[in-house]
Image (cartoon, helix red, strand yellow):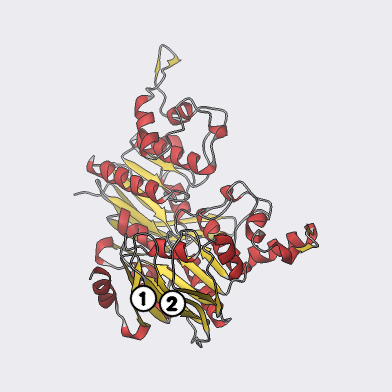
Amino acid sequence: MSPLLEVDGVKKTLGRTVVIHHGSLTIHPGTIHALLGESGSGKSALMKCLSGVWAPESGVMRYGGTEEFPGSVAEAARYGIRLVSQGPSLIPDWTVAQNIQLGTETSRWGRLQKSEDSPLSEWLNRFGLTQVKPETRVRGLNRFERRVIELIRGFMAAPELLLLDAATEGLSRQQVATLGVALREYREGGKAVLFSTTRPQECASLADVTTILCEGRSVATGDIHQVSSEQLSQVMTGLEPAELFPRSPHTRGAPALEIMDFTPPGAAPTTLTAYSGEILGLFGVPGAGRTRLLRAIAGLIPAPSKEFFIQGRGWDSENQGARWRAGIGYQPQGDPGSGLFPNRAVGENLLVTRLDAVSVKGFIRGRSERFMALDWMEHTDVEATSENELVMNLKAGSQRRLAAGRLYYHQAPVLLMDEPCQRMDITSRIRLYRRMDKAALSGKSVLFCSSNPVELLAICDRVGVVREGAVQEIRPVSEWDREALWTAAWM
């Protein structure tokens, strides 16, 4: 089959900065093509060149019988190319329906024709925006709802080549799954999609072919199903496995958490000891009960126990507040903002669990609160305009780093982390692994729950397998491999 699009040798400079040194890729009809790279690798710049937003200094583009880059967005649309950009592009004072129709309006006798609302309503419902109607004004929607509407507008325009820049940014897991279904349906219609991402695991779940950009250069292209996420990460970052999974030797200390016959509802009893100065990994297949177990340990789910000791002190309270004060910190699994207050400021979210550090006799010192928040924002790499920015306006990666940062700020001796790396880019994952390593080095006990055996085997000291909501066996990491973990998880 002849390619739909061929691009070779693209170069683009902004001021004195070369954002693309040598961009090349080939896209065939009826394929989903991923453009994978770290932030700043040139993904957005290449898409803007393909869609007529920017004009490159050099390079060749062949598309639909033409051999030149589109000179404008309108010309790209005539070619059959449409870009859903990463930045906001909706008009706040218009309705959802008006924004969807923008750029694809039809007219009769000089009057614009109103588009049908039923297909739009179906798309809104598919993505879970049941409360949003075609007549809803965009101004009243949050950042993530607006992002979904921008994606819907791209699909409804039905171009031959749909470009989605940072397609999954801010979407929930269910919305990402819905996006995957929509992409496959689009592919079956003979059309092509190019989407950019910083997450190798999304290439495996959404794409047919992947092109990797590294520092503005296309460095590899291939069938995504023939390589692993770890191999993609190495090519994408140029890092060796030891750099992808930073880990130091840990010295195991005294027991930090001891539970015996701990039985959450519907689960088998669990008995385990987690030590200070170690990372204890918990592996299990979906539905094995890992999240239920961690929620019960955190006090969110009632669970009887014969013994429950935190740093050698017995506790019989099943209240989350009591467990939190006793020294158990919990980062829940879920969407990026899980466990945060989206309508409150970044600084408030970060410091709320330990206000004594910024208060005197019950009164918060504003200056101390601000400096403490800014210090921890820098320490945890939270990207925000200030400590007063609302959490709902942060990118998904920053929300996850904020949730993890609050856990470290609380200085809990026992850290429960449930799938903290889900939907993180490579750089954010490496940062999180380093923080977990430092936490263990400082004497904390980290319980790291993950469905990815590779990262568990790379950074943990011991790994246990969860079945039927209980930890069935725990061994030193040297006694496990991937096959053994999967076998034990399915027994």
Question: Callout 1 environment at 10 Å: few (<14), some (14 to 19), or many (20+)?
Answer: many
Q: Amino acid at mark 1?
A: Gly
Residue at 55 percent of width and 61 percent of height: 320
- Residue 129, relative to residue 389: is it above or below? above
What number is the disc on residue 464?
Answer: 1
Q: Is residue 371 left or right of residue 15?
A: right
Residue 315 visible (yes or no): yes
Query: Quick check: marks 2 and 1 in contact, CB under 8 Å?
Result: yes
Say which quarter of the image contains residue 190.
top left
Question: Callout 2 environment at 10 Å: few (<14), some (14 to 19), or many (20+)?
Answer: many
Q: Is residue 268 left or right of residue 435?
A: left
Q: Amino acid at mark 2?
A: Leu
Q: Position of residue 237 (x, y in %)?
A: 44, 70
Q: Position of residue 116 (x, y in %)?
A: 37, 22
Q: Is residue 458 left or right of residue 343?
A: left
What number is the disc on residue 280?
Answer: 2
In which quadrant of the rendered image does the C terminus lie? bottom left
The foreground one among 301 and 20 is 301
- Residue 259, relative to residue 395: is it above or below? below
Q: Decide which of tag 2 and tag 1 comes sooner along the chain.
A: 2
